[in-house]
Image (spheres, rainbow, N blue to C red):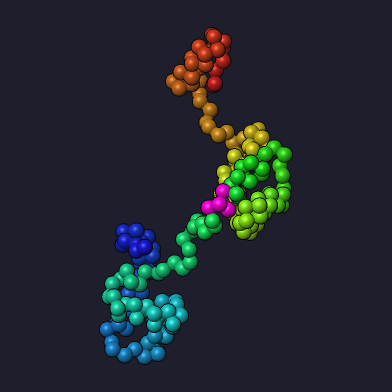
Amino acid sequence: MKTSIEQIPEEVWQVACAREAVIRPLAASPHVGRAEIKAAAKTLGIRRAYVYRLLAAYRRRRQTSTLVPKHRGRPQDTRVLDQRIEAVIEAAINGFYLTRERPRFSDLMRGIEARCHAETLDAPDYRTVRRRLNDFDACKVTAARQGGKQAREMFGAALPRQRPGDPLSKALGRRWRSAWGGASLSLA
């Protein structure tokens, strides 16, 4: 997938422009000596081998975007597990781990491994399960495992309280009073 120039962050583009200022004179000459490459590497703060790669790429395509630093590896938050294993992990977390009994993480792992074994799937690594667990909202995890009161104490109220003079609280108060047969119940 190619990135358009508009999507490149300004600081990354500045790095590419600085590289071009050093690489362009090297690309203009037919033969570049080792001393020139070494000086360019020192100026740019990169290794000599990378200067050779940048020079070759720039000679093939003389554009600043050619010199934009590339990010290696998978994009962040990429998941490569089989969807069935992801479903087992999510079901185990929601159905077993997020309960008031507060089972241990090791018990969660044993449950996931047993379920994967029953379905002839490879069991995920504990770090993968830990990352999936960390993806859950901490407030919701605390509320499910320790109760709403503890979650409110740790994370604050989920919604800001309405002041009694706000139109919304008056409307909600009227609705609640009419729903409860005139009883004086208000949300304020």
x then y, percent, for residue 168:
45, 22
x then y, percent, for residue 183:
57, 10
Identify the residue at image location x=39%, y=82%.
52
Q: Is residue 89 above or below residue 1?
A: above
The residue positioned farthest toward the top in the image shown: 182
Quadrant containing the C terminus is top right
Query: Taking the image as drawn, is residue 62 in sight?
Result: yes
Q: Nearer the viewer, residue 158 or 115?
A: 115
Identify the residue at image location x=64%, y=38%.
144
Q: Nearer the viewer, residue 140 or 123?
A: 123
Q: Is residue 68 left or right of residue 124?
A: left
Q: Is residue 138 left or right of residue 27?
A: right
Q: Is residue 142 left or right of residue 24?
A: right
* Magenta region, residue range: 83-87
> Overall secondary structure of the magenta stretch?
helix
Q: Is residue 160 above or below residue 87?
A: above
x then y, percent, for residue 39:
40, 84
Query: Taking the image as drawn, is residue 153 in sight?
Result: no
